[in-house]
Amino acid sequence: MGSSILTRSVSELRFLLRSGDVTSRDLVEESLATISALDSGINAFTSLRGDEAVNEAALIHPHDDRPLAGIPMAVKENRGVAGQPISQGSRSLLHARARTDDTVVARLKGAGAIIVGVTSMSEFGLLPGCEPAAHGATRNPLDRDLSTGGSSGGSAAAVAAGMVPMALGNDAGGSLRIPAAWCGLSTLVPSDRIGGSQDGVLARSWSDVVLGTDVIGGHERPRAGDADPGRGRFVVLTTPPGVDPGTDTSMGIDRDSLGIAIEALEEAGFRQQAIELPSALAGMRSFFPAVAPRVRATILRALGLDPLADHTQAEAFDLEPYTLSFLDHAGRVSIESQQRATAALDAWEREWRSLLGPDTVLVSPTTASIPPPLGQLTGLRRIEDSASALAEPTAFTWMANALGWQAAAVPVARDQAIPGSVQITAPRASAATLETASAIVASLVATRGVARRQDAPHG
């Protein structure tokens, strides 16, 4: 696996930087050297900043007290890094370069982070894998025959392989949490349904996730703080939302990791609460018509097309079959249907929130399966032919986005190649409870370590 120093937490690295034991230039050069040594077999990065990153690192002094001063980071390629490619995983945009830094990238740089490169993603972030035709498959560093998950798979692979200690991604239905789960990482998705894809970071430690989320959230994210575990409650979901508990499915739910997390929460003082939750069918039926037209408009703008244009104009571009069919389906949603679906989601969210009450979180598996072999989560199939492949990765993740709630994914150590992962979900009012619960579960990895199969390919 990659550089041992780059697998340390940001707080540890900041201590080393302040003490003068290492310099930012040391860390950035180590990051670039590790990428050079490993990425030909993993394919996490689509471009590197090289000399620019080294020169920026040379300007960081030991007494720089900014929260990410001198820390090498990677950025998912749908967020602009000035001068770098921004293809968004699409062959149609391989020529595109960002003229300026995206707001979230500017915040990272303002906090002192050194951006070493840009990472791969599925085309326009539509699929829960990272195998775009534009760049080829990104391989999971824990087992290179398996998917990283996605769409933020390149960022997850870069952290899991020890190329960088933290990376930026975003999530509109599981794009941070799925690769976090399949690469043994932690992440947090802020709450906001209709705002589109939410930015977040992928890291090994929960404290790094909170730090990175604070930085990219700017003034819009007030610190949640700590909650009293003795007041906390949690509701367990063992069946994917919208699936009848009595239905026989082929989903491989990881109940062992869920049980470990439940035990840890109870030992810390959280109380498990039995609530008969409302059906999720209303959310399942409304999520696509409420959100897909906005996603479609974003894609068409990226292609230089009028968002109100007929979707068939996109057929002139070299898009994957899944993307073309998504544009087709999303373009069939009328404004009236979108408005009705949005109102239905609002009502559904109020119903769920009223039942949970304050200081309560939902605890579930992050995904309903281990990562599949490469080749199953590509854009080669149309949307109507992809339901079975997409069902298990997104079975538990979609609901947080549909509700507009925040959601964390936290690894759980187990004796397998891929760690288990637990998702913790809550409305904005329970942010402190969610972060406290996530920290408790994350501490299991800190104390037990993440078991890795000895024969897994490594660099």
Image (cartoon, rainbow, N blue to C red):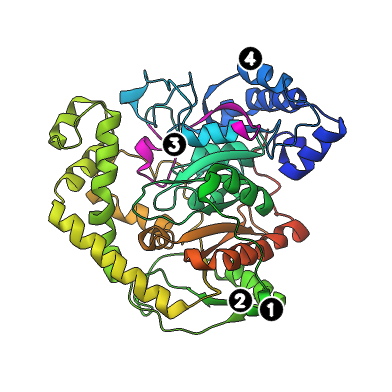
Residue 439: x %, y % from top left? 67, 61
Circle number at residue 232: 2
Name the residue at 82% across, 29% down: 22
SS at mark 1?
loop
Residue furthest front in the image: 219
Circle number at residue 121: 3
Task: Please name the amino acid that badge 4 sits on.
Answer: Asp
SS at mark 2?
loop
Q: Residues within 10 Å of mark 1 (few under 14, many from 20)?
A: some
* Closer-to-camera residue (215/153): 215
Name the residue at 63% across, 35% down: 111
Q: Is residue 36 visible?
A: yes
Confirm or deny contact between disc 1 and disc 2 (CB under 8 A).
yes
* Sequence-first disc among 4 and 1: 4
Task: Please name the amino acid that badge 2 sits on.
Answer: Gly
Q: Residues within 10 Å of mark 2 (few under 14, many from 20)?
A: many
Estimate the spatial distance between the alpha carbons at disc 4 and disc 3, rounded to whole Å. 24 Å
* Sequence-first disc among 3 and 1: 3
